[in-house]
Amino acid sequence: MSALPRVTVWNEGRHEKSHAEVARVYPKGIHGTIAEGLASHGLTVRTATLDEPEHGLTQDVLAQTDVLFWWGHMAHGEVRDEIVERVYERVMEGGMGLIVLHSGHFSKIFKKLMGTGCNLKWREIGEKERLWVVNPGHPIVAGIGEYLELEHEEMYGEHFDIPAPDELVFVSWFQGGEVFRSGCCYYRGRGKVFYFRPGHETYPTYYQPDVIKVLYNAALWAAPVGGPEVKRGHFPQPMEKF
Ligand code: ZN
């Protein structure tokens, strides 16, 4: 694909409604802030939230989405299974990219694509996080320094119950001593998945320019490549003459 990917930023959008401190940090919603950041890099971005009909992820919206961002936390269980299946099919068969953010590690769609429990260790005391680039040739770290530093974040620590990433891009160090695989790439069917750890709802992480730059790079990396249609099933006719 030569054109820039069409992006949809999906957010559960509940913390912003129920927690005043989150509404203060993200008055336009986490989705609004991420969308603005990506748009500032020239991407065409739409947003969708849990409480819209079909969670804002209609067949039409998904058909026009090359890369879907996913932020969720307190309402993973409210995401309808048929919508999860729809997103899954769009990744596996349609080649859509999926960028799963922070507490999205426990979303139905991420667990389905990983096939593991996706649990981890966590602590919320606002400690410092340093995300070290461990794959400096990877397109997701274009224009990024040796590391990203976040003054205050929630801690996620190993062990993170995921399959070994196909490509590991970041490893986080936390002030409290834990480490975490915080930037993980996967190939699934015709599509790609990137998990990016930072983004707890009470910290202004998604205003930080180098964080947005990573998300922008990830959108370019995860965009469909226009590869072959997948064919499976019974093929009774051999391709060569016998
Ligand atoms: Zn969190």
Image: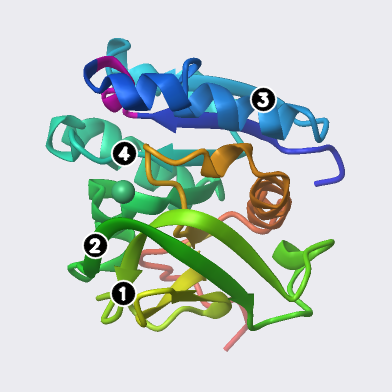
Give the residue type at disc 2: Arg
Cβ–Cβ below 8 Å for labels 2 and 1?
Answer: yes
The answer for how far apart the CA atoms under marks 2 and 1 are is 9 Å
- 87 to the left or right of 33: left
Q: Residue at x 87, y 44 (%)?
A: 2
The answer for how far apart the CA atoms under marks 3 and 2 are is 29 Å
Q: Residue at x 49, y 74 (%)?
A: 172
Give the residue type at disc 3: Glu
Disc number lying in front (1 or 3): 1
Mark 2 surroundings within 10 Å by alpha-carbon count, few (fewer than 14), some (14 through 19), many (20 or more): few
Cβ–Cβ below 8 Å for labels 4 and 2?
Answer: no
Residue 75 x/y as whole percent: 18, 33
Q: Which residue is mark 1?
A: 157
Residue 190 x/y as whole percent: 54, 58
Q: Which residue is mark 4?
A: 72
Disc number lying in front (2 or 1): 2
Q: Which residues are magenta?
A: 12-17
Q: Residue at x 33, y 25 (%)?
A: 21
Cβ–Cβ below 8 Å for labels 1 and 3?
Answer: no
Quarter of the figure with the C terminus:
bottom right
Mark 4 surroundings within 10 Å by alpha-carbon count, few (fewer than 14), some (14 through 19), many (20 or more): many
Question: Which mark is drawn over residue 36?
Answer: 3
Disc number lying in front (4 or 1): 1
Residue 171 x/y as whole percent: 52, 78
N-term-proximal mark, 2 vs 1:
2
Q: Nearer the viewer, residue 151 or 196?
A: 151
Question: Which mark is drawn over residue 123?
Answer: 2
- 132 to the left or right of 19: right
Disc number lying in front (3 or 2): 2
